[in-house]
């Protein structure tokens, strides 16, 4: 009997093709986010689970007796209880490389649009308020020559730094440890967290969501930023205290924000919806045709390798392979 794989959502066909011939695929066609119960029902009799960043993959899901492999169609995996998966010897993979450049593009797009009031200007014109060029109309912040502070300069943060070089920005970054390659390539300067917040004109957040990074940007951090600062988040919503962000914008502690992710996604704080100095996107970081196809190929290749008894390249919990010879 062919092994079965449950997909919580349909993903681009180039990925599905990789698995179609050798495995029995069960694809949930509903476009809504599945409940935990739907996932549990869906994986009955399935060895493989291909899931999304929206899906709750907790102990109850991972306790499903048939489940042996999990591949997420995402870079971030904060929705998966990886520790519990490891305790059950379930390998979990992600799809990180494919979306690096595309997510850096959207971070830079937010930086430009929030800094130069692009979306606000578009709204202004469409509502019929443009009556001619004016010396003080919708003035924004320069990008060139300004300082970009990158919190979490991993793959995506590093790709953002490379874009900033083209705009002649000065780059500061904060990581757990310095990155000499990034420094050499972009001139980025390793800077302690608080110092980076105080000295940056643009602060862009790129940390994964973990217990340590939850609310890493809250009232204290907004208080340290320049009053002219533009804050960008394309990582995960809960890394930021959204209520504190709203207050910082309301009180003028920071100047603007560009957000692709939200603390209670897909819910967005009503107050943000009413602010002109905030650019909001519905989690589009990786949303390009090519990148979503690349992510599907990665996620399905990972699954194919696991099912074939091979160690996949994007393994999140390599400890599951420590006592298995493959
Ligand atoms: C991811 O894969 O983690 C991204 O947030 C998708 O855009």
Image (cartoon, rainbow, N blue to C red):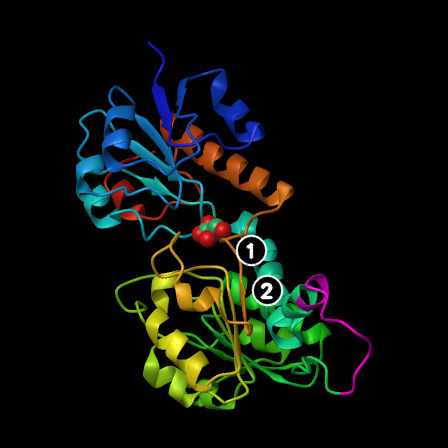
With respect to residue 267, does 55 lie above or below? above
> Which residues are drawn in magenta?
124-135
Answer left or right for 28 relative to 161. Answer: left
Which residue is at 55% across, 72% downward? 276
Could you tell me which secondary element the residue under label 2 belongs to? Answer: helix
With respect to residue 260, does 253 lie above or below? below
* Residue 41 lies in quadrant: top left
Asked whether the residues under the numbered discs 1 and 2 touch, taking CB atoms below 8 Å apart as contact, a structural biologist would say yes
Depth check: give the residue in front, 159 or 148.
Answer: 148
Which residue is at 17% across, 26% downward? 65
| Residue 241, visible in the rendered structure | no
| Residue 19, visible in the rendered structure | yes
* Image location of residue 95, percent across then percent down: 47, 45
Q: Quadrant of the C terminus?
A: top left
Which residue is at 59% across, 60% downward? 106
Answer left or right for 111 relative to 305. Answer: right
Answer left or right for 214 relative to 124. Answer: left
* Residue 90 lies in quadrant: top left
Q: Is the magenta stretch mostly helix, strand or loop?
A: loop
* Residue 135 lies in quadrant: bottom right
Q: Residue furthest top?
A: 1
Q: From mark 1 to mark 2, how far is it between C-alphas?
A: 7 Å
* Image location of residue 132, percent across then percent down: 82, 76
Looking at the rendered structure, which numbered label has been put on residue 159?
2
Residue density around tag 2, few if under 14, some if 14–19, many if 20 or more, within 10 Å: many
With respect to residue 100, does 16 lie above or below? above
Question: Where is mark 1, residue-wise?
Answer: 100
């Amino acid at each position: 009997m062919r092994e079965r794989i449950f997909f919580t959502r349909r993903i681009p066909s180039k990925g599905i093709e990789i698995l179609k011939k050798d495995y029995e695929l069960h694809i949930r066609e509903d476009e809504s986010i599945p409940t935990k119960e739907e996932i549990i029902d869906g994986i009955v009799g399935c060895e493989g689970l291909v899931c999304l960043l929206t899906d709750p993959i907790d102990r109850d899901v991972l306790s499903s007796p048939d489940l042996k492999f999990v591949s997420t169609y995402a870079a971030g995996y904060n929705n998966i209880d990886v520790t519990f998966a490891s305790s059950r010897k379930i390998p979990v993979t992600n799809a990180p490389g494919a979306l690096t450049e595309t997510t850096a593009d959207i971070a830079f797009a937010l930086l430009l649009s929030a800094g130069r009031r692009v979306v606000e200007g578009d709204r202004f014109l469409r509502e019929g308020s443009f009556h001619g060029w004016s010396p003080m109309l919708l003035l924004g912040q320069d990008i060139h020559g300004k300082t970009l502070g990158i919190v979490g300069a991993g793959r995506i943060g590093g790709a953002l730094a490379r874009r900033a070089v083209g705009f002649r920005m000065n780059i500061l970054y904060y990581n757990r440890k310095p990155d000499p390659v990034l420094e050499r390539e972009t001139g980025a300067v390793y800077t302690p967290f608080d110092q980076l917040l105080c000295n940056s004109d643009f602060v862009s957040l790129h940390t994964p969501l973990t217990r340590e990074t939850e609310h890493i940007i809250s009232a204290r951090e907004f208080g340290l930023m320049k009053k002219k600062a533009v804050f960008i988040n394309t990582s995960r919503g809960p890394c930021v205290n959204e209520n504190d962000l709203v207050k910082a914008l309301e009180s003028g502690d920071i100047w603007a924000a560009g957000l692709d992710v939200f603390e209670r996604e897909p819910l967005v704080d009503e107050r943000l919806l009413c602010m002109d100095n905030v650019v909001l996107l519905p989690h589009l970081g990786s949303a390009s045709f090519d990148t979503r196809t690349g992510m599907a190929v990665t996620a399905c290749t990972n699954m194919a390798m696991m099912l074939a008894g091979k160690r996949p390249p994007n393994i999140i919990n390599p400890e599951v392979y420590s006592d298995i010879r493959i």
